[in-house]
């Protein structure tokens, strides 16, 4: 099978990295690239000649605007992997309600025009069907998974400083609930030995810094942005890891990259109890799910701090689940299976 990856992208976002890492391990799959640097300089003849040689065309996350453009030129099935709804992200999550109509159509048009629409969870698929009236038959669920060659257990775990490190990394977008994590740190600020290691920056970063200063919190270590390839070593030092705690429908629909990454290292993860996360994970077996309040999150941190064996047990179950069923090879196999089914049905 030959697959052409195209779009205005460097194809280095985590979702695509996982998929490509798995496809590269498949001897019967060949991947081609045709990045769109600009519409003005786009070589249509070269693209058309290349797409004639492949079986499918894949457009990566966030490139909603590329779907109609590519579909006009392509004679091969177009697979769109949006990962997000622009409407759900901007109009709802970010509360930019004045953008609602524009963002709605920015989803509706590419979702309708592509031949195969990917969703990372069944919950997300149901949202696409209901909100945008998309035929459920054209939507296939492909979990994000993890590239275990990048995110894996280190021989040395923890910091070796006798502190209990509660870790988080992310881009501080609303669905992650970063201000809520700051509130958790406030509740636990007088608990000796607990420190919050926070990696990343983004939308809620300034708001989070203001809260830290307002509450005079000394138990938070803001580490800032780090290189993607440096994450593995840093995450391995966490004792427990925090997932997401946003209050929106988007937060309820996804299983974020970080949860797969934490699990592939054998970490015990605390996250919001959502329909999305429960599609793969099971509470108190391979993850700890809780009500979405700072008080409940704090309770779980304190409980786990006193139950090291539970941390190890849940982390090991998460490791076994994700590294066996959701590694890059399994995700790529699922992806190719989706394409083969489309081919046989059409």
Image (cartoon, grey):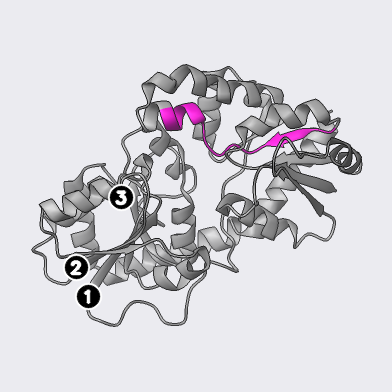
Tag nearer the camera, 3 or 2? 3
N-terminal label among 2 and 1:
1
Q: For numbered disc 3, what is the local secondary structure?
A: helix
N-terminal label among 1 and 3:
1
Comparing 325 with 246, the one in front is 246
Comparing 277 with 16, the one in front is 16
Above or below, 145 against 55 in this view is: below
Q: Residue furthest left?
A: 190
Q: Do the residues labelled 1 and 3 touch (CB within 8 Å)?
A: no
- The residue segment tinted magenta is 76-90
Q: For numbered disc 1, what is the local secondary structure?
A: loop
Label 2 and label 1: CA atoms lie apart by 6 Å
Above or below, 177 against 250 in this view is: below
Q: For numbered disc 2, what is the local secondary structure?
A: strand
| Residue found at x 46% / y 82% | 155
Label 3 and label 2: CA atoms lie apart by 21 Å
Measured as percent of width and height from the top left, residue 78 is found at: 75, 33
Alpha-carbon neighbours of circle 3 within 10 Å: few (<14), some, or many (≥20)? Answer: some
| Residue found at x 44% / y 54% | 259
Q: Can residue 306 be seen in this view?
A: no
Residue that label 1 marks: 163
Measured as percent of width and height from the top left, residue 157 is found at: 39, 78
Residue that label 3 marks: 205
Residue that label 2 marks: 194
Q: Quadrant of residue 60?
A: top right
Check if residue 45 falls in the magenta segment.
no
Measured as percent of width and height from the top left, residue 346 is found at: 84, 28
């Amino acid at each position: 099978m030959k697959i052409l990856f195209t779009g205005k992208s460097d194809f280095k976002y985590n979702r695509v990295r996982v998929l490509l890492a798995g496809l590269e391990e498949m001897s019967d799959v060949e991947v081609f690239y045709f990045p769109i640097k600009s519409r003005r300089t786009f070589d249509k003849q070269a693209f058309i000649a290349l797409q004639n040689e492949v079986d499918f065309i894949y457009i990566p996350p966030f490139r909603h605007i590329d779907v109609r453009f590519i579909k006009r030129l392509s004679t091969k099935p177009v697979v769109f992997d949006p990962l997000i709804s622009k409407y759900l992200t901007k109009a709802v999550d970010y509360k930019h309600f004045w953008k609602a109509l524009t963002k709605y159509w920015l989803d509706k048009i590419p979702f309708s025009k592509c031949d195969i629409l990917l969703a990372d969870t069944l919950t997300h698929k149901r949202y696409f069907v209901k909100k945008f009236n998309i035929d459920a038959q054209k939507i296939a669920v492909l979990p994000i998974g993890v590239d275990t060659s990048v995110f894996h257990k280190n021989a040395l775990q923890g910091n070796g400083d006798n502190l209990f490190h509660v870790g988080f990394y992310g881009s501080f977008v609303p669905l992650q609930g970063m201000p809520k994590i700051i509130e958790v740190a406030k509740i636990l600020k007088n608990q000796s030995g607990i420190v919050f290691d926070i990696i990343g920056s983004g939308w809620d970063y300034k708001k989070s810094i203001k809260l830290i200063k307002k509450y005079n919190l000394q138990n938070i270590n803001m580490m800032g942005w780090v290189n993607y390839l440096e994450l593995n070593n840093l995450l391995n030092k966490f004792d427990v890891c925090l997932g997401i705690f946003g209050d929106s429908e988007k937060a309820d629909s996804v299983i974020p990259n970080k949860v797969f990454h934490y699990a592939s290292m054998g970490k015990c993860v605390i996250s919001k109890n959502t329909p999305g996360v429960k599609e793969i994970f099971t509470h108190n077996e391979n993850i700890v799910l809780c009500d979405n309040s700072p008080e409940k999150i704090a309770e779980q941190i304190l409980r786990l701090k006193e139950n090291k064996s539970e941390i190890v047990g849940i982390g090991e179950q998460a490791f076994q689940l994700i590294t066996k069923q959701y590694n890059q090879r399994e995700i790529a196999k699922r992806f190719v299976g989706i394409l083969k089914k489309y081919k046989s049905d059409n």
